[in-house]
Image: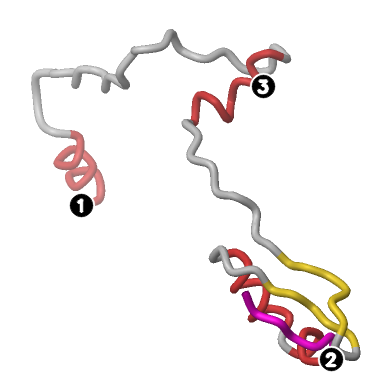
C-alpha cells in the first residue's frame, strides 16, 4: 500500500492511477492524515456473450444459439480466370 501526500498525488496523478489499476492501493494524505483511498476496479473475466446479454435482453441484438461455432462460408468456385488476373487484364 502506497501513501502519498495530496500535492504529490496532484503532480503525478497518472502514475498513481496506474498503480491502482495494477491492484496497488494508494492512500492519499493531507498533512499526514489519510483523506482518501484509491483502489482499482476488480478485473472480471467475462465472456463476450455475458457482456452482450443486456443488449439482447433489451431486444437490440440477437445472440446466436449457444455452442454455435463461428463457421466461415465455403468459397465459391467458378470457371475461368481468377479475379486478380481479370483486373490486371483490364488495367493493361
Please tell me whether mark 2 sits on a helix, a strand or a loop. helix
The quarter of the displayed image where residue 5 is located: bottom right
Query: Of all residues shown, which one is farthest toward the top?
Result: 65
The residue at 68%/13% (across/down) is: 57
Q: Is residue 31 left or right of residue 23?
A: right
Q: Is residue 57 above or below residue 82?
A: above
Q: Is residue 57 above or below residue 51?
A: above
Whichever of labels 1 and 3 marks the residue nearer the N terminus, that label is 3
The residue at 50%/34% (across/down) is: 46
Whichever of labels 2 and 1 marks the residue nearer the N terminus, that label is 2
Q: Is residue 24 left or right of residue 3?
A: left
Disc on res. 7: 2
Task: Report which residue position mark 3 lands on.
Answer: 55
The magenta span reads: 1-6
Task: Report which residue position mark 1 lands on.
Answer: 92
Q: Position of residue 38 (x, y in %)?
A: 73, 67
Amino acid at each position: 500500500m502506497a501513501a502519498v501526500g495530496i500535492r504529490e498525488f496532484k503532480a503525478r496523478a497518472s502514475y498513481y492511477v496506474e498503480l491502482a489499476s495494477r491492484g496497488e492501493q494508494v492512500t492519499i494524505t493531507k498533512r499526514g492524515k489519510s483523506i482518501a483511498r484509491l483502489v482499482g476496479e476488480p478485473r472480471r473475466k467475462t465472456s463476450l456473450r455475458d457482456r452482450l446479454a443486456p443488449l439482447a435482453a433489451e431486444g437490440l441484438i440477437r445472440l446466436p444459439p449457444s455452442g454455435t461455432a463461428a463457421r466461415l462460408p465455403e468459397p465459391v468456385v467458378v470457371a475461368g480466370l481468377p479475379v486478380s488476373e481479370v483486373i490486371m487484364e483490364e488495367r493493361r
